[in-house]
Image (spheres, rainbow, N blue to C red):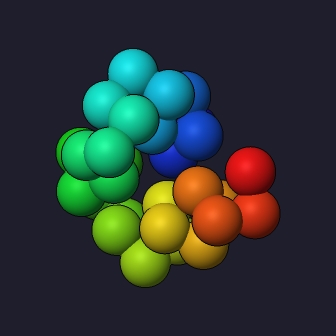
């Protein structure tokens, strides 16, 4: 679900509650 939250926040991966996991997904695409 982090990806869904990430798409809304784009740069605000912290909104996902897992900045590390979200950051990894962000780099992976």
What x and y, as percent, mark residue 2? 51, 45
Instruction: Confirm whether residue 28 shows in the render.
Output: yes
> Is 1 in front, or is 29?
29
Q: Quadrant of residue 28?
A: bottom right
Number of marks in the rendered image: 0
Q: Residue at x 64, y 65 (%)?
A: 27
Vertical placement of residue 25 versus 21, above or below = above
Spot the residue most to the right. Answer: 28
Q: Please give left or right for residue 15 compared with residue 20 in the image.
A: left
Residue at position x 50%, y 28% in the image: 7
Vertical side of 11 occupied by 27: above or below: below
The answer to whether residue 9 is left or right of residue 7 is left
| Foreground residue among 17 and 24 | 24
Percent across and percent down for residue 8 are 39, 21
Q: Position of residue 23 (x, y in %)?
A: 49, 68
User: The N terminus appears in which quarter of the rendering?
Assistant: top right
- 23 above or below 29? below
| x then y, percent, for residue 25 | 65, 61
| Residue positioned most to the top | 8
Which residue appears at 58% of the width and 40% of the height?
A: 3
Instruction: Work out whether residue 5 can be spotted.
Output: no
């Amino acid at each position: 679900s982090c990806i869904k939250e990430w798409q809304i926040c784009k740069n605000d991966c912290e909104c996902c509650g897992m900045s590390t996991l979200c950051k990894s997904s962000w780099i992976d695409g």
